[in-house]
Amino acid sequence: MEVGDIRPYIYPDIELDREEGQGIEDLKANSQPAIPDPDKWLDEELSQNILLTSADALINWGRRSSLWTAICFPACCAFEFIAANGPRFDLARFGMEILRASPRQADLMITAGTLTWKMAPNVQRIYNQMAEPKWVIAMGSCGISGGIFASAPYAVVPGYNHIIPVDVYIPGCPPRPEALIYGIQMLQKKIAKRRNLTLGKD
């Protein structure tokens, strides 16, 4: 059986490589300073009244009690994350037994492992696809500062906070399940103080 001519690709390989490389270089150029931690709620906490605090408490209770997680490059920290999901540590008691493969159904991203500049656009894309409100936990030394590979090659991102805003940092290489649970509890306390409703100004 004869097969007809194979259709050539629409875009040549060298053009695709050049386009991808330019995107990575642009991201590197725009990601040198670290993104400041999202802690605007600290300044707004005093302006809440009893009515708004009660409504916020109800909304925040629902959000912090049902965090749906998107796992992003867990690397060797994955073993500690798997242990945290097991029966001994039981992450399900925090409403986190649902691990989403789709970022559109998740509101928490747990990042871990060495991130290269080549993969950085994908991490940023996953974060942008998550619905608001959303939070990020940087788990382990690699997620916080690039880990042991930060100063060696040119290709390693020195921390996920150069690409996306990080809410909670969990140090360790890798951190134990107890540390991950403590970091999740810190995030839940942060969510509990979030302001959702605002009064119109005259």
Image (cartoon, helix red, strand yellow):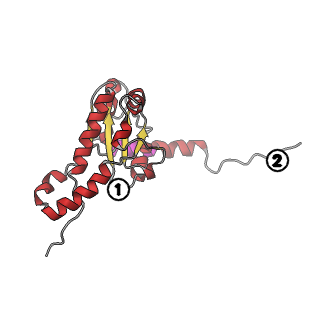
Q: Earlier in the sequence, mark 1 or mark 2?
A: 2
Numbered disc in front, either 1 or 2 = 1
Left or right of 198: which side holds 131?
A: right
Question: Which quadrant of the view contains residue 161?
Answer: top left
The magenta stretch spans residue 23? yes
Would residue 148 be visible to someone looking at this image? yes
**Dots 1, 2 in contact, CB < 8 A:** no
Identify residue type, mark 1: Glu
Q: Is residue 33 above or below residue 105?
A: above
Q: Can I make out residue 34 in this image?
A: no
Measuring from the top left, give residue 25's x and y in whole percent: 40, 42
Label for residue 114? none
User: Looking at this view, is 45 or 73 the one in front?
Assistant: 45
What range of the chain is rendered magenta? 22-30
Q: Give whichever of 72, 185 is nearer the camera.
A: 185
Q: Residue at 27% across / 29% down in the picture?
A: 171
- The verdict on residue 20 being magenta is no
Within-10-Å neighbours for mark 1: few <14, some 14–19, many 20+: few
Residue drawn at x 40%, y 28% is: 83
How far is disc 1 from disc 2 in space, using C-alphas?
A: 50 Å
Which residue is tagged 1?
132
Tell me the kind of residue under disc 2. Gly
Q: Main secondary structure of the magenta part?
A: helix
Query: Where is residue 22, by image quadrant?
Result: top left
Dot 2 crowding, Cα within 10 Å, few <14, some 14–19, many 20+:
few
From the top left corner, tell me how far across and down residue 180 is, in percent: 31, 33
The mark total stands at 2
Quarter holding the N terminus? Answer: top right
Q: Position of residue 21 (x, y in %)?
A: 47, 41
Which numbered circle lies on residue 4?
A: 2
